[in-house]
Each structure stands twice: as C-alpha cells, then as structure tokens.
Image (cartoon, rainbow, N blue to C red):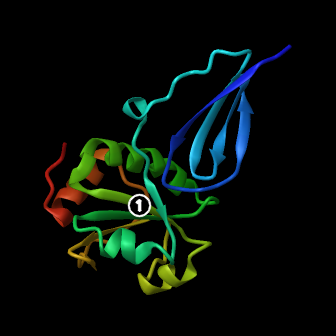
Amino acid sequence: MTMMTMTTMPTMKSTSSARVNDGRVNGRVNGAVVVARRGGGARARGVETATRAVTDVDEATFDAEVVGAGKPVLVDFWASWCGPCKLISKIVDKAEKEYGDAIKVVKVECDANPTLVEKYSVYGLPTLIMFKDGAEVEGSKNEGAISYDKLKAWVETHSGVPPP
C-alpha cells in the first residue's frame, strides 16, 4: 500500500494547481504550497527553509502592492510567450532574494493586465520600471533583457539602494 503525506506552507498567491514530479505532488491549494511525497516520509518545509518569492500583482492589487509599498519597488512586466522575459526571470528572482527588504520586487503578467500595460506605456517586453514614494521613477523604464550586473547598477541608479 502506498502512503502519501503532505506538508503545507503559506504563500502570496492562491491557485489550485499541482504537478507530479519524481513521485512528489507539488502545487498550491488555497494559498498554500503543497509538497507531498509518495511512500511516506514527508519532506519538512518550514518557514525558515522557505525561499522568498516575487509577488505577482494585477490591476486589482497594483496600487496596494506597488504604490503603497513604502519602499522602492522593481516592477517586471512580462508575458509567458516572451523569450527575453524568460531569460531575465531568474535574474529578477535573484535580485529579490539578494536585496531582501531593501526593495520590493513584483511581476505583472501583461496579457492579463492590459490597463496597467497602457497606463505605464509598456511597448516592449520585458519591461522593468522602478517605483519610489508611490510613483514611477522618471527615466527608470528599461525595455529588453538585462544582465544581473546591469540590473544592480540600474536598481542603485533609480532607487538609491546600493547593490548587495
């Protein structure tokens, strides 16, 4: 008889998808990450071992998460079909982890949020925009892929936060 155990961990985004990989079922259910391992012996995933995650925002949450953040916010406008967006995704994730609480990093999926795309004149993807004190930092819009070293210089220039 196969036994399955589950461990959950709170996350920012609520979905109800799961995938099976190497005998484990991984996914999100009602806002919690679910990691189940077949054959017993659940792998412990406590908050202390959790990695930070970039927040996904949409038209309904943008003002609260970005404009009202109270610290500089790097916004990554992206699309699932965009090759360069996939290239910088790991770079943006790395920045979120390394800058810690000094800046906030969020992602906006363009196809699902046309009002934000129009409001911030996002014409090319990926587009990075820095927000500070509740407003877009003038001249901070960066269209196209960027290296991590250039991203760190861009963040310092437009947020005033030094590189980690």
**x then y, percent, for residue 77:** 47, 66
Helix, strand or loop at mark 1: strand
**Residue 68: which quarter of the image?**
bottom left
Q: Quadrant of the N terminus?
A: top right
Q: Which residue is labeled 1 in the image?
A: 106
Q: Closer to the camera, 38 or 122?
A: 38
Q: Is residue 64 above or below residue 149?
A: below
Q: Does residue 60 appear left or right of residue 104 in this picture? A: right
Q: Residue at x 43, y 52 (%)?
A: 54
Q: Is residue 68 above or below residue 50?
A: below
Q: Is residue 135 above or below residue 57?
A: below
Q: Does residue 151 appear left or right of residue 86 in this picture? A: left
Q: Residue at x 67, y 28 (%)?
A: 36
**x then y, percent, for residue 8:** 57, 37
- Give, as a three-letter code, the residue at label 1: Val
Count of numbered circles in the view: 1
Q: Closer to the camera, 111 or 40?
A: 40
Q: Does residue 68 appear left or right of residue 156 in this picture? A: right
Q: Residue at x 45, y 50 (%)?
A: 88
**x then y, percent, for residue 57:** 48, 66
